[in-house]
Image (spheres, helix red, strand yellow):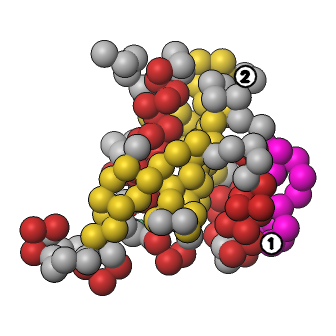
Amino acid sequence: MTATILTPAAAGRSPADTPDGAAVTVTVRPLDPGERDLVERFYAALSPGSRYLRFLQAVGPALPEPLLRQLLDSDGVGRVTLGAFVGEECAGIASYAVLDSQPDAAEVSVAVAEAHRRRGVARLLVDALAQRAAAHGIEALVCLVQPGNRAALRLLRSLGVVPVLAGGLLEGRRLLLPPA
Ligand SMILES: CC(C)(COP(=O)(O)OP(=O)(O)OC[C@H]1O[C@@H](n2cnc3c(N)ncnc32)[C@H](O)[C@@H]1OP(=O)(O)O)[C@@H](O)C(=O)NCCC(=O)NCCS
């Protein structure tokens, strides 16, 4: 899947009003289990605060092995990890994993590199995950967010999701339509 988004300098303007070079192409594709270095580098480059918001716990620049395995051991059905690329650079990573307690729902998580934020990369990734999840019979995507995470709450709102308080976190649930 590819999409065109605006560069930060052109963000907020209409694509029709932006000069040549203001748009970049983002490619979204599944990450290969062999792309361990890429995944490690992506999370090491995020700020500690962004890693905390993504993993809902304090995580150092070197991801613990269980978290890395969750991202890399994708089976393409119940567990999927997608990367968004601008050229060779990984701009964002999003994943879903079917919940043990709700086999018809999957928990989704996303992080976007600081330099590529507010350009629609997260929404692109979540939409691509939603398409794959729906194609595999998953009926809902669930996202847990820290109550103070303004960017993630705005992302949920832009997807039409109204989060509710659940055990100190906010839980957003996006119902998926089966593919036509
Ligand atoms: C949350 C996060 C993934 C958003 O990524 P992004 O690529 O910047 O988001 P998008 O550009 O797709 O934006 C989607 C919507 O959120 C809004 N938004 C994004 N960042 C925002 C911010 N800092 N403040 C206010 N709104 C923000 C966008 O304006 C857009 O809404 P709109 O269409 O109504 O304008 C990113 O900030 C991030 O990686 N945060 C750290 C990890 C995290 O919090 N993950 C979420 C929990 S799993």
Residue at 72 percent of width and 59 percent of height? 39
Magenta stretch holds residue 40: no
Is residue 117 among the parts visible in the rendering?
A: yes
Vertical order, 145 against 76 (above or below) = below
Compare residues 16 and 130 and report the one nearer the observer: 16
Q: Position of residue 133 (x, y in %)?
A: 52, 27
Q: Nearer the viewer, mark 2 or mark 1?
A: 1
Q: Which residues are magenta?
A: 57-70
Q: How many marks?
A: 2
Q: Position of residue 26 (x, y in %)?
A: 41, 59
Q: Position of residue 116 (x, y in %)?
A: 46, 71
Compare residues 107 and 135 and report the one nearer the observer: 135
Which callout, 2 or 1, points at the residue further toward the start of the chain? 1
Q: Is mark 2 within 8 Å of ligand 1?
A: no
Residue at 45 percent of width and 70 percent of height? 117
Q: Which quarter of the figure has residue 50? A: bottom right
Disc 2 target residue: 101
